[in-house]
Amino acid sequence: MREWIELQQRLVPDLLEVMAKRYVILSQVMKSESIGRRALAAALSMTERTLRAEADFLKAQGLLEANAAGMRITDAGRRLVESLAPFMSELSGLSELERLIRDHFRLREVIVVPGDADEARETKRELGRAAGRVLIRSLQGGDVVAVTGGTTLAALAETITVDQPLKGVLFVPARGGFGESMDYQANTIASTLAKRTGAAYRLLHVPDHLSEDAYQSLMLEPNVREMVEVIRKSRIVVHGIGDAMVMARRRKMDTRTMDAMRAEGALAEALGYYFDKSGTVIHRMSTVGLRLDDLEKAEHVIAVAGGSSKGEAIAAVLRYGQDDVLVTDEGAARRLEAIIRQERQQADG
Amino acid sequence: MREWIELQQRLVPDLLEVMAKRYVILSQVMKSESIGRRALAAALSMTERTLRAEADFLKAQGLLEANAAGMRITDAGRRLVESLAPFMSELSGLSELERLIRDHFRLREVIVVPGDADEARETKRELGRAAGRVLIRSLQGGDVVAVTGGTTLAALAETITVDQPLKGVLFVPARGGFGESMDYQANTIASTLAKRTGAAYRLLHVPDHLSEDAYQSLMLEPNVREMVEVIRKSRIVVHGIGDAMVMARRRKMDTRTMDAMRAEGALAEALGYYFDKSGTVIHRMSTVGLRLDDLEKAEHVIAVAGGSSKGEAIAAVLRYGQDDVLVTDEGAARRLEAIIRQERQQADG
DNA sequence: ATCCAATTGGACGTATTCTGTCCCGGATGA
DNA sequence: TCATCCGGGACAGAATACGTCCAATTGGAT
């Protein structure tokens, strides 16, 4: 069953939406014993005309009937709603999860794709694809989009597709090089994104582990300076979220700093900043580019991360409170759900 | 699973079609290691443009990929096809059944709805609805449509819906009254159909069990005569199929005739005629209206009957060979399948 | 009994999408 | 090297969806 739904999700996602829409119409009509077209449209926040089209269809199927007093559900319709209920709750299981997370962390939108990136490689690609759709949807002409590195963002870059080339959009790396492998660097990802979408890109070449002197002199370079200014004005920021210790090791952080961070309870990493459980910044990479303050000005801050192992890290970054949209997978979302419930219990007890 | 599919059918009838279409595209691409758009469209007998729309969708879903050499399936696509295969074969079970029956009885079209009218009342309504769609689809302005009586035709009449009123269509009973209960008489059904579709209707009032004298004098009546002429020119005929003995009893046939009929192996009834296993007419009701010969002139002869108990009767009537379209249910279709296989075995052995 | 408010179904122009058809530059394989 | 077949762009016309308004009807409250 579960499998069947997932396959359908993949092959006919739009029809499942249609199905869900008709289902909610039916069940709404069932709840209200008799209801008029306009009232129903308002209740479901649809326009009158579209609701009417659906209602006509449902009538033709013998699931609804209408008279001068309004519409009511037929016996067949009632039976259909009742037998469909368990399927729909499973189908909409993810959207309930989305709602829960969205409301708890005060996000604008949460998208949960089925699966667990820790277990299936395919899920990470799916995560990237979903994030790509969110990004495309948010874009306007003239936008500057800052992106970070990481395997998840790489999946986004590799799977993104557009209808028409994105004229006037500029992809930039959010911050300077973090010494990861080439494929997962922000520079690479910005350029891949630009190439796949017909947009422009600009890169930021900054070596790692700069001394304070070197940093200062680099910032005096006009082209670096200007590029940083462009980056900091990004209207859209897409970033991954990592486990603090894993990222620190990958970036060959020196042992002393690492020990200090561990002592402070470092949990998550995003945009080169390290966060503890409460979402407080306890360390930052010494490089140039987007700063956390800049996120306030950005209109779309999109976090993309999945895999049940990243649940805590995601929660930590979300608590910092500058993200607008979270794209994640079911594995991580279930962890988030557990964290939320636990927290609420403590608050109650 | 089965239940889920049926519910989906009800709520989004085109869902499975679209899904099947995309599935065959994917599997076709998988078979041909690499194939071009035009070649693929030809192989699936689709137009280039529609195929392209679907292919673009499948690309966006990451199931197909395209390069200058043609399209090929991705790993994700391959996995999808493989896991979907068992479902699709079950799903396409009905269309295979349809094909089998259609080819064996040389029909133009066969439609099989899921379920068994003997077991679920809902299936009979579904049967009626499907038949209604076939009827609507066949209609043109100025058509005369002859219908018979029976519970199945009653279900058709009660469930039919139209987008616009059918101007210029005329519904008539196929033959004179057969002494069934009012609701299931051809006259009632013709008038219900007309009212529900905005078409016109005319009735034929002929008492049952006429003596030869009475019959002759009735036929001298100008209005009866004219009405019979209208009926016999019907371009479309929709009829049910019954079990011979059940119908004989319901129509209070006298015992002697019944015994004679039984002796001759009466199996099926349609349009007031009784057929044996081979489709030969062995008895006819003494009433006026459509004759079997008239079916040749009719352009659409649509048989509607379901329930596994009617399998043999349906086969018998189909063997008479004047039907164009059969609308039935899975229960009856499975019986037909068994009959066909049995027959082929005998032909082989 | 009467009136009001709300209903459905019809109508219609516009916006949007779909689809048949053709073309082009380019990669591929003979 | 060349012919062939590919994907993708383009576009006009058809078909469909949609917003909007209106009229007739009716159920229910006053």
Image (cartoon, coloured by chain):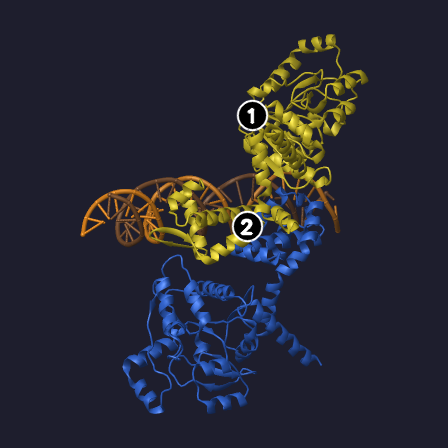
Chain colours: A yellow, B blue, C orange, D brown
Residue B319 percent location from the top left of the image: 55, 79
Indicate which disc residue A85 carries.
Answer: 2
Q: Which residue is mark 1?
A: A143
Q: Residue furthest right?
A: A255
Indicate which disc residue A19 carries.
Answer: none
Image point 38% across, 68% down: which residue? B143
Residue B46 visible? The answer is no
**Badge 2 sits on which subunit?**
A
B206 lies left or right of B42: left
Q: Residues within 10 Å of mark 1 (few under 14, many from 20)?
A: some
Q: In whole angstroms, how far apart are the C-alphas of marks 2 and 1?
A: 43 Å
Image point 50% across, 74% down: which residue? B323
Disc 2 residue type? Ala
Determine the secondary structure under disc 1: loop
Residue B94 percent location from the top left of the image: 60, 64
Disc 1 residue type? Asp
D17 lies left or right of A106: left
Which part of the image, by quadrant, shows the C terminus of chain B? Answer: bottom right
